[in-house]
Amino acid sequence: MISAIYPGSFDPITLGHVDVVERAITVFDELFVLVAENEQKQYMFTLEERLKFARETFQSIPHVHVDSFHGLLVEYMRAKKIRVCVRGLRVLSDFEYEMRMAITNKQLWSDYEVFYLISDIKYANFSSSLVREILHFRGHINDFVPNSVVHYLKKQQEEDDV
Ligand code: PNS
């Protein structure tokens, strides 16, 4: 049985992330989607909101679990005895960041391995930061994020309008 993790900020989760999860679970027996909490970072959505979006999105996919982590990723992996990390690669500019992170994680824990999935071309431009920018300017994000995010924001908007 090979388990893997798929870590990220997911601030918020996008359809690009969903595509990675749906493909990764066809390769691995079990996948933990790990929502990062890092007090050095300023998120648009709280950890609870980011977890809620991920849980609702993946609730119907067997063997996909959602959890959060704080601190070093390799410490979570070591504790859970999971050696494989999944990451999505969209465009060339992702590579430098990913490579630096992969080398660092390997130096921190020699058992660490990383598995990259090249983004489907449909999602090659998708990013959480793009979604946050669209939201900032009150644009429509429906084509970029799963329904859980759309419904949540719609409900929030309705409550604000009251
Ligand atoms: O979605 P992101 O923001 O690209 O995800 C980055 C993430 C959360 C996977 C990365 O920042 C991370 O693993 N943070 C935990 C801290 C850590 O382990 N740092 C050392 C590796 S560089």
Image: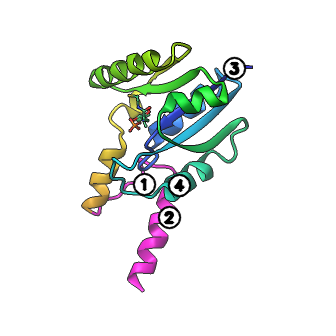
Between the C-alphas of marks 3 and 1, the distance is 34 Å
Q: Is the residue indicated by label 4 positioned so its CB lies within 8 Å of ligand 1? A: no
Residue 148 in percent (x, y) is at 54, 56
Q: Are marks 4 and 2 in contact (CB under 8 Å)?
A: no
Image spot of residue 121 (x, y percent): 39, 27
User: Mark 2 or mark 3: which comes first in sequence?
Assistant: 3
Mark closest to the chain's N terminus, 3 or 1: 3
Give the main secondary structure of the magenta stretch: helix
Q: Mark 1 or mark 2, which is nearer to you?
A: 2
Disc marking residue 142: 1
The amino acid type found where label 1 is placed reads Asn
Looking at the rendering, in which quadrant would you find the N terminus? top right
Q: What secondary structure is marked by label 1?
A: loop
The image quarter in which residue 125 lies: top left
Placement of 35 over or under 133, stated as above or below: above
Question: Mark 2 belongs to which amino acid?
Answer: Tyr
The label number, if any, that marks residue 147 in the structure image:
4
Q: CA distance from mark 3 to mark 4?
A: 30 Å
Q: Tell me, yes or no, whether the highlighted magenta stretch contains residue 141.
A: yes
Residue range in magenta is: 138-162
Alpha carbons under labels 4 and 2: distance apart: 8 Å
Residue that badge 2 annotates: 152
Q: Which mark sits nearer the N-terminus, 3 or 4?
A: 3
Query: Position of 80 compared to 143: left or right?
Result: right
Q: Dot 3 corresponds to which residue?
A: 2
Category of crowding for the residue at label 2, using alpha-carbon neighbours closer than 10 angstroms: few (below 14), some (14–19), many (at least 20): some
* Cα gap from disc 4 to disc 1, whole angstroms: 8 Å
Residue 127 percent across, percent down from the top left: 35, 40
Type of amino acid at the residue the image marks with label 4: Asn
